[in-house]
Image: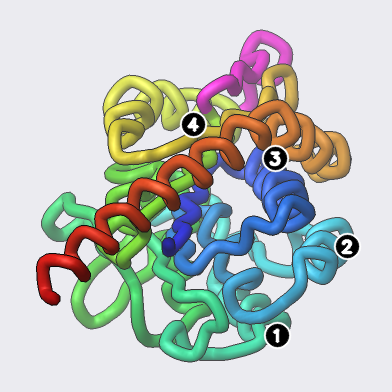
Amino acid sequence: MKIGLALGGGAIYGYAHIGVIKVLEANGIIPDFIAGTSIGSLIGGTYASGLSIADVEKISKEFKWQEIVSVTIPTEGFMSIDRLKNFVDKYSKCREIEDTKIKFAAVATNLLDGKERVFDKGSMGAAIRASCSLPAIFTPAVYDDGVFVDGGITNNVPINVVKNMGADFIIGVDVIAKAKPNVLKNHDIFNIVWQSFLIMIQENSGFRSYKDADFMIMPDVKNFAPFDLSQKEKIIKKGEEAAENEIGGILAKIKEKRSLLGKVKDMLTKDRT
């Protein structure tokens, strides 16, 4: 049975993905497929490339915004994240998506047609940079076939993508389902744009994709600011806690579905004979 992991977008809340993966690994659950949106593509892509989750955690804890962000004239966005491609190339175990240890796809939104774009081949760094391009805050990624912004606009938890990749059992991780940043306390331009973006995702696309997931994990990240890196260790811990709370049910459902698939396989084998 092939296991798929769909990692949702959510700015710094995405650090919770690290905690989730740590718990899954500790319980013997290693995904065969990973699809990620925004920071879900960054965490998921570097992990899929062959980095251990311990290495991903170490890199993430040492991360500073200036490694990927540069201030720009605000015509397309307040900041450029073109450096993100180089960041991914530096730490990823492979440069091309086709070479990842775990099959991987990143989701972005193409402004030319308003549809999701699934990057399942080509440059890892370019795909993840496109997926993380939060509108207004970060400049879009411009490639030959489109102008790409954050995948969260069209598909924040790409469960359908990992299903199409061939997963039999799908675990989705939504890091914004319980997000409630305090806009009264932090009402600068970045938090206002983020909160607007968050409302749109939660209302329009955040929950509609759950139906194809076998299990959903939703870390409790309320009261955390979406761009405050000083909270990253606490958010990783929130991911661990959320996964620990669900791991019993996940393991039971995997066993149940594996048994069912085995029976179906036996029936098909008997029919052939």
Indicate which disc, 4 or 1, sits on the residue closer to the N terminus.
1
**Label 1, label 3: how far apart the Cα atoms are:** 23 Å
| Residue at screen point 17% across, 50% down | 114
Residue on which the image places disc 3? 227
Residue at the top extreme of this rendering: 184
- Tag 4: residue type? Val
Percent across and percent down for residue 116 are: 24, 55
Can residue 189 be spotted in the picture? no
Mark 4 or 1, which is nearer the eye? 1
Q: Is residue 235 left or right of residue 199?
A: right
Indicate which disc, 1 or 3, sits on the residue closer to the N terminus.
1
Q: Tell me if label 2 and label 4 are in contact, CB under 8 Å.
A: no
Residue on which the image places disc 1? 90
Closer to the camera in the image, 157 or 102: 102
Residue on which the image places disc 4? 193
Closer to the camera in the image, 36 or 136: 36
Q: Residues within 10 Å of mark 1 (few under 14, many from 20)?
A: few
Residue range in magenta is 177-189
**Label 2, label 4: how far apart the Cα atoms are:** 26 Å
Q: Is residue 122 magenta?
A: no
Indicate which disc, 2 or 4, sits on the residue closer to the N terminus.
2
**Label 3, label 4: how far apart the Cα atoms are:** 12 Å
Q: Is residue 144 left or right of residue 155?
A: left
Residue on which the image places disc 2? 62
The quarter of the image holding the N terminus is bottom left
Mark 2 or 4, which is nearer the eye? 2
Residue 67's quadrant in the figure? bottom right
- Tag 2: residue type? Glu
